[in-house]
Amino acid sequence: MARKDRQPNYHPVLKLWIEKERKNRRDDIVPPQAKVAANYASPMGAKWAAQRAGYDDILLVDEDGYIAEGPTTNVFMVEADGRLVTPPEKSVLLGVTRSSILAMAKDDGIVVSEERVRPERLQQAAEVFVTGTTAGVWPVGEVDGRDIGTGGAGPVSEKLQARFRRVVSGDDPTFHHWLTHVHGE
């Protein structure tokens, strides 16, 4: 995956394209919360086209043009006042990593809001990051060719990324109950 480096302490960030032609799944056909192969097929053509154009991934919009999610990720934005915003449950796959980030952010005292977000508002955010099983927490530096914030990882995404790594490695006792330990014979 192509990555951008805009900070002296190398923090790889994503370049995203907002896919405006193909919409996210519709609730009246196959709900976005259904983890089925059919929910992944439609956006892949758009993702491949975006990658050929130099982007790493895409974000989908819902049927009303609001930001929904990536093909295999959830999206978060940080407002100038530090508030963390993500699309509402109605519009997205309810990812385990998404839920984990919401819980960790609240535990860190970050104000969290689930609300509909227009593409223009996302592009004006102080920070944007995506989450997913394979992505973990991945900062976004650019959306549709426009820098987000400084064009690199911001303090909130870095903080949540570091905490997420501590939690999944068992080094954060607050969320130790999320882990299932496997013992060798």
Image (cartoon, rainbow, N blue to C red):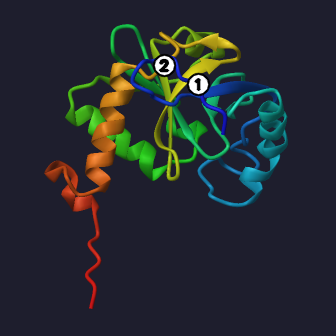
The quadrant of the picture occupied by the N terminus is top right
Residue 130 versus residue 165 in the image, above or below = above
Residue at position x 21%, y 31% in the image? 108
Residue 39 versus residue 154 in the image, above or below = below
The percent coordinates of residue 17 (x first, y second) are: 71, 25
**Residue sticking out furthest to the left:** 173
What residue sits right under mark 1 in the picture?
Answer: 4
The percent coordinates of residue 121 (x first, y second) are: 57, 11
Contact between marks 2 and 1 (CB within 8 A): the answer is yes
The percent coordinates of residue 179 (x first, y second) are: 28, 63
Amino acid under disc 1:
Lys
Residue at position x 61%, y 30% in the image? 3
Frontmost residue, 169 versus 93: 169
Mark 2 → mark 1, Cα distance in angstroms: 8 Å
Residue at position x 79%, y 52% in the image? 41
Of the numbered discs 2 and 1, the one sitting upstream in the chain is: 1
The percent coordinates of residue 148 (x first, y second) are: 54, 13
Amino acid under disc 2:
Gly
- Using a 10 Å C-alpha cutoff, classify the residue at mark 2 as few (fewer than 14 neighbours), some (14 to 19) or many (20 or more): many
In which quarter of the view is residue 22 placed?
top right
Relative horizontal placement of residue 61, taking residue 178 as reference (left or right): right
In which quarter of the view is residue 82 placed?
top left
Residue at position x 36%, y 37% in the image? 161
**Residue sticking out furthest to the front:** 8
Assign a secondary structure to mark 2: loop
**Residue sticking out furthest to the bottom:** 185
What residue sits right under mark 2 in the picture?
Answer: 152
Assign a secondary structure to mark 1: loop
Relative horizontal placement of residue 59, taking residue 77 as reference (left or right): right
The quadrant of the picture occupied by the C terminus is bottom left
| Mark sitting on residue 174 | none
